[in-house]
């Protein structure tokens, strides 16, 4: 999948998440797999970066690595400095610097997406586990699998 295609898939998943879940948009991970694109919401996504990093590292271990997923997206609602809400998408893939794009949220839905740009290395450090899992995907193995476990895991 080319970076522009990954961006489009993740933006479409973000719009779909907004339509299904409403506001505030829950944090979610997008896994574009050959059999289907999975959008996995992260109920109770933590507020602090250290706990977020741990939760996403667990997600990567439990879902991305078994699926050999070489790409991901992350969707969340955020606020601009002026308090206006944004729908934010970060996406990454094996060997690709993570990229970020956002759209203002209006009553009728998201506005225009900003041009994607590389995510600053110090920004959103909790996403590093997703990127590490994508980078670890083995190009010689098949991607996906119909028997992927659910999230969160039972008892988790």
Image: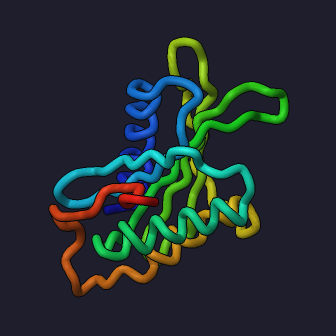
Query: In which quarter of the view is residue 134 placed?
Result: bottom left
Residue name at image x 60 percent, y 24 percent: 105
If the image is split into quadrants, where does the N terminus sit? bottom left
Left or right, residue 134 beside residue 103: left
Q: How many marks?
A: 0
Name the residue nearer the viewer: 54 or 25: 54
Residue name at image x 28 percent, y 71 percent: 67
Q: Position of residue 56 (x, y in %)?
A: 54, 64
Name the residue nearer the viewer: 102 or 114: 102
Name the residue nearer the viewer: 44 or 83: 44
Query: In which quarter of the view is residue 98 placed?
Result: bottom right
Residue name at image x 46 percent, y 65 percent: 59
Q: Is residue 119 above or below residue 84?
A: below
Residue at the top extreme? Answer: 107
Coloring applied to the structure:
rainbow
Query: In which quarter of the view is residue 55 placed?
Result: bottom right
Name the residue nearer the viewer: 115 or 144: 144
Left or right, residue 46 beside residue 80: left
Q: Position of residue 27 (x, y in %)?
A: 54, 44
Left or right, residue 36 beside residue 102: left
Residue name at image x 38 percent, y 55 percent: 151
Q: Is residue 113 above or below residue 143?
A: above
Q: Position of residue 135 (x, y in %)?
A: 45, 79
Residue at the right extreme? Answer: 82
């Amino acid at each position: 999948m080319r970076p522009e295609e990954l961006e489009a898939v993740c933006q479409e998943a973000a719009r779909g998440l907004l339509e299904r879940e409403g506001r505030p948009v829950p944090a979610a991970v997008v896994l574009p797999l050959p059999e289907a694109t999975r959008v996995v919401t992260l109920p109770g996504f933590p507020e602090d970066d250290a706990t977020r990093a741990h939760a996403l590292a667990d997600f990567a271990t439990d879902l991305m690595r078994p699926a050999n997923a070489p790409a991901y997206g992350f969707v969340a609602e955020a606020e601009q400095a002026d308090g206006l809400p944004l729908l934010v998408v970060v996406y990454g893939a094996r060997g690709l610097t993570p990229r970020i794009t956002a759209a203002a949220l209006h009553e009728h839905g998201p506005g225009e997406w900003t041009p994607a740009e590389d995510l600053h290395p110090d920004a959103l450090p909790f996403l590093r586990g997703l990127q590490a899992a994508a980078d670890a995907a083995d190009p010689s193995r098949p991607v996906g699998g119909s028997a992927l476990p659910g999230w969160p895991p039972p008892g988790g």
